[in-house]
Amino acid sequence: MTSLPLLTPAGPKGLFAVDKPAGMLVIPGRAGEAKEGPCVRDLVSRQLGRPVWVVHRIDRDTSGVLLLALDADAHRAASLAFERHEVKKTYLALVQGVVREPLDIGLPLVEARKRKMKVAPPGLAGKPSRTVVRPVETFARATLVACEPLTGRQHQIRVHLMAKGHPLLVDHQYGRREPLRERDVGGASDEVVLSRTPLHAAKLELPSLGFVAESPLPADLRAVVERLAGGATPRGHY
């Protein structure tokens, strides 16, 4: 891969978004991750022929909208919008079980071992955390949901969904570690159909800066949705 799709032009406000593929780091990793290929920041910098600033991060396995800036002023303005909670983020996720009604999850989180998070146990305050979840499309044993994190804790969506009994279909840290195979989604073969966490940053809005970027559901997740739906074509834009 030599370039990343630009979801918005690198315009006069100095902000733009790219469509980050699953499996790519946002910024250079630690020494042990040095052989994992280019990161988004460096790849986009070479693509545009100039330095770029990363405004926020999404997990390595997560695909979708990633916001960057062309200069320090744009980076500062966007970072302030995040600090003031003036940003609306929408993620799509494929989860276990059937989610029939919207969920408003307000479970506080604390740090756990091995760089993980967990719901705060009784007697421990934890960091206030809230995620609003709504079902988009339901299947026999899974649901495509839209998640709006109203706070920005590490792994918040994944931990909240797990706590409510609806972990992601694959999650190496908080649920099923084995890849999803065709027989797991209604088929008969052992063909691997999903090996990464099915979480996608679908939309990012900064109303105070007049900025909106959207990313369609990527091909690997669309393929799983098709299988879950019995071969039907996904309904398109979620």
Image: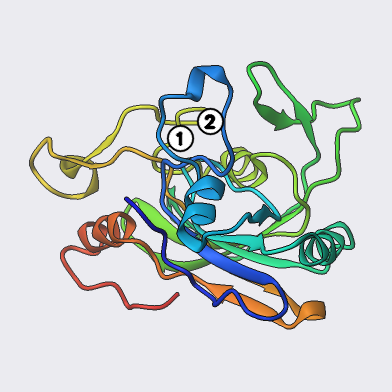
Is mark 1 in CB contact (under 8 Å) with mark 2?
yes
Of 48 and 228, which appears nearest the observer? 48
Q: Quadrant of the C terminus?
A: bottom left
Question: Mark 1: few, some, or many residues within 10 Å (few <14, many ≥20)?
Answer: many
Give the residue number, with chain letter if any, for mark 1.
171
Image height of 165 relative to 204, above or below: above
Q: Position of residue 198 (x, y in %)?
A: 42, 48
Q: State whether residue 140 appears in this view.
A: yes
* Residue shown at the point (27%, 55%) measured from the top left: 224
* Residue shown at the point (55%, 18%) measured from the top left: 31
Image height of 226 relative to 181, above or below: below
Q: Position of residue 146 (x, y in %)?
A: 54, 64
Q: Does dot 1 land on a helix, a strand or a loop? A: loop
Give the residue number, with chain letter if any, for mark 2.
174
| Residue reaching furthest to the left | 189
Residue 78 is left or right of residue 238, and the answer is right
The disc labelled 1 sits on which kind of residue?
Asp
Rendering quarter of residue 171: top left
